[in-house]
Amino acid sequence: MNFTSFTGKVTFPVLLFLSIQLSGQDRLFLENCVSPPVPQAAGTTLCEDIGEFEPDIVIGQHASSVTFVSTLTNTVNWFGTDSYFYKKIEIHGRLILDEPLFFFLCDLKMGNNAEIITLGENHLFGQGANYFA
């Protein structure tokens, strides 16, 4: 074989190694799939810690609303999953997860009769999210 007459392109794979430092709470999340606890002031409730709640997003209009994740129009697609980042969200009625849903550092207030129901293998993911009623 004569390599001097080779005219094709040669492709070399390039590996990129990144290093990040994880805190103890981040490691706990990655190892055990649990959300790290949010520090709370002694003797206060989560509602008191969050204070005045003015939602950025309202899901469902009233206590008997039924909303499917697949119909939400204000989510961000993050690796194929409907997601909310850094939002204050109020849920009314029934939220049905017909697709996975991810909350990252969100405050979720559950209104009267609010429910979150999963269908099939769909899951609700929350990283650093606060849920309260």
Image (spheres, grey):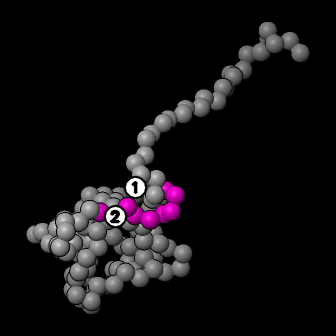
Q: Is residue 17 left or right of residue 125?
A: right
Q: In the structure shown, which secondary structural element does the residue marked by tag 1 occupy? A: helix
* Image position, residue 113 (x, y; %): 27, 89
Q: Is residue 101 magenta?
A: no
Q: Which residue is mark 1?
A: 25
**Looking at the image, can residue 62 be seen?**
yes
| Outermost residue to the top | 4
Q: Which residue is mark 2?
A: 37
Quarter of the image for residue 89 reads bottom left
The amino acid type found where label 1 is placed reads Gln
Name the foreground residue: 34 vs 2: 34
Quarter of the image for residue 47 reads bottom left
Residue pictured at 43% horizontal, 46% vertical: 22
Name the foreground residue: 14 vs 67: 14
Q: Is residue 121 left or right of residue 36?
A: right
Vertical placement of 93 versus 70: above or below?
Answer: below
| Outermost residue to the right | 1
**Looking at the image, can residue 58 be seen?**
no
* Image position, residue 10 (x, y; %): 69, 22
The residues tagged by marks 2 and 1 sit, at their Cα atoms, a distance apart of: 8 Å
Residue pictured at 45% horizontal, 69% vertical: 100
Disc 1 crowd rating (10 Å Cα; few below 14, some 14-19, many 20+) is few
Name the foreground residue: 20 vs 108: 20
Quarter holding the C terminus is bottom left
Question: Magenta region: which residues?
Answer: 30-38
2 and 1 marks in contact (CB < 8 Å): yes
